[in-house]
Amino acid sequence: MVRLEKRGRTVTGWAEIEIRPLATGGAEIHWREELRLRGLPRALDPLVAAAGRLLFGRALTRLLRP
């Protein structure tokens, strides 16, 4: 498991990535994340979270392709 702290000028928050082996081979990945964009009101957090899931999910899928 790894926890990344984001302290950028625009994006702050954290991400936790946990990789667990599967009994049948391969692995299962759990990704938890909380992002904030500086300058945006907290009311937009759900929208930011949805966009993050979409973008990071696509990036992770590309990285895991054989």
Image (cartoon, rainbow, N blue to C red):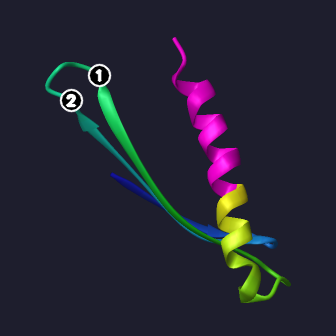
Residue projecting furthest to the top: 66
Q: Residue at x 22, y 19 (%)?
A: 25
- Can you give x and y, in whole percent of width and height, for residue 36 in the image? 69, 75
Q: Residue at x 83, y 83 (%)?
A: 40
Q: Is residue 18 above or below residue 8?
A: above
- Can you give x and y, in whole percent of width and height, for residue 2 in the image? 39, 54
Instruction: Give the structural element (helix, strand or loop) at label 1.
Output: loop
Q: Is residue 6 above or below residue 56?
A: below
According to the image, label 2 marks what residue? 22
Among the 4 quarters of the image, the one containing residue 42: bottom right
Q: Is residue 42 left or right of residue 61?
A: right
Residue projecting furthest to the left: 23
Secondary structure mainly formed by the magenta segment: helix
Among the 4 quarters of the image, the one containing residue 9: bottom right
Question: Is 64 covered by the magenta stretch?
Answer: yes
Instruction: Name the residue nearer the viewer: 2 or 62.
Output: 62
Q: Residue at x 54, y 17 (%)?
A: 65
Q: Residue at x 33, y 51 (%)?
A: 1
The kind of residue tagged 1 is Gly
Q: Is residue 27 above or below residue 44?
A: above
Question: Is 3 covered by the magenta stretch?
Answer: no
- Can you give x and y, in whole percent of width and height, for residue 47 in the image? 73, 69
Q: Residues within 10 Å of mark 2 (few under 14, many from 20)?
A: few
In magenta, the rendered stretch is 52-66
Q: Residues within 10 Å of mark 1 (few under 14, many from 20)?
A: few
According to the image, label 1 marks what residue? 26
Q: Are marks 1 and 2 in contact (CB under 8 Å)?
A: yes
Q: Is residue 33 left or right of residue 10?
A: left
Residue 50, label in figure: none
Instruction: Name the residue nearer the viewer: 56 or 1.
Output: 56
Between the residue at mark 1 and the residue at mark 2, the CA separation in whole angstroms equals 6 Å
The kind of residue tagged 2 is Leu
